[in-house]
Image (cartoon, rainbow, N blue to C red):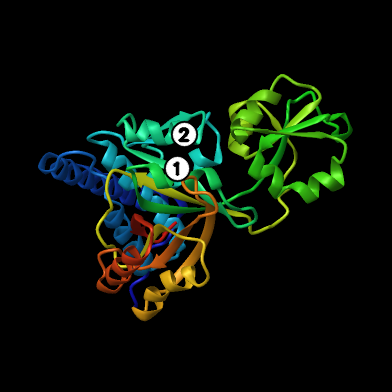
Amino acid sequence: MADRKPEVTLQSLREEIDRIDLDILRLVNARARAAGDIGRLKTGVLYRPEREAQVLRGVRTHNPGPLSGDTVAFLFREIMSACLAFERPVTVACLGPAGTYSEAAAVRQFGHAAQTVGCATLEDVFRTTETGKADFAVVPVENSTEGAVGRTLDLMIETSLKACGEIQLRIRHQLLAAPALTDLSAIRTVYSHGQSLGQCQHWLNAHLPHAERVAVASNAEAARLVAERSDAAAIAGELAGERFGLHVLQGDIEDEASNTTRFLVLGPEIPGPSGQDKTSLVFATPNRPGAIHELLTPLAQHGVSMTRLESRPSRMVLWEYVFFVDVEGHCEDPAVAAAIREIAGKASFCKVLGSYPVAVL
């Protein structure tokens, strides 16, 4: 007579889950102890962007399922965040108050164990990190709908901080109001960051054409301003609404369904190569025919792929422009390094803003 398979019951499955949970608990604490041992061998901030990117790519590659690659990557992000905080939480400056998309981007990159430092302006974000009051900064650099964040680019030229990471955050704008406001027709003013107002202009034209649009420092600040108003609404994310007790009058009002903001992580140094990197640089050239072509030629000659080119008026010389360029590869890669040397030799100004792992999450 063939052996009968043990009967699978709800209780037996729960007992199996309990055993697995204890194994997970043991292994997570073992990882935290190992991270603590590393901390005792090192000085300064332990966060290494290139190392974390390699780990997250690795778990995606070796993930057997059934959980998705995104899910396991987010789980490991939080495990690494908690293990890193075992010695000392990483502090990250970003636009505040609490509830901004910048804060959401910081949490996406560093996990919930990191401590965010909300700043009123981009200038304050840079200054807080430059003076050592925060380990890193997270700043918006471009949006898929509205383009570059000009003030960030201007500050990148001046700062001693280096770009050491990037974050791609899908932006979902909500029209938020105090609980007493339930009718769109009662709205006289809409507050939001200028970029967000631009990203929702078609919806606003169609549904709130007569409402005044007021740009403020951040979407979370907009949410704070309307918390006690019965005739105003804010455009912000759900997190800001939760922070200030607002409800969603209309969800996902952004004009582009793929609306995404790219953030840069700034820190004291450029991380080492991770195997899949970008390099950002800025250079200037006199306003003469063929000058920009001449400066970009070394990239083609060395087989370096350019992924982004953005021009801004120079703040130093009238009618001169600076050009922000992103290329594939790390500044230590031989081809990238050679191209940058040639560009620097021809440009009136050239600065490597940083090299960093391509966004994983």
Q: Is tag 1's residue or tag 2's residue first in the polypeptide sequence?
A: 2
Q: Is residue 111 visible?
A: no
**Is 269 displayed left or right of 221 in the figure?**
left
Assign a secondary structure to mark 2: helix
Specify whether 322 is left or right of 23: right
Q: Quadrant of the N terminus?
A: bottom left
Q: Nearer the viewer, residue 133 or 344?
A: 344
Quadrant hosting residue 225: top right
Kind of residue at badge 2 = Glu
Mark 1 vs 2: CB contact within 8 A: yes
Q: Position of residue 292 (x, y in %)?
A: 48, 68
Q: Residue at label 1?
A: 155
The residue carrying mark 2 is 123
Counting labels gives 2
Decide which of 199, 156 is in the foreground and name it: 156
Residue 73 is left or right of residue 190, and the answer is left
The front one of 5 and 310 is 310
Residue shown at 62%/38% (left/top)? Answer: 238
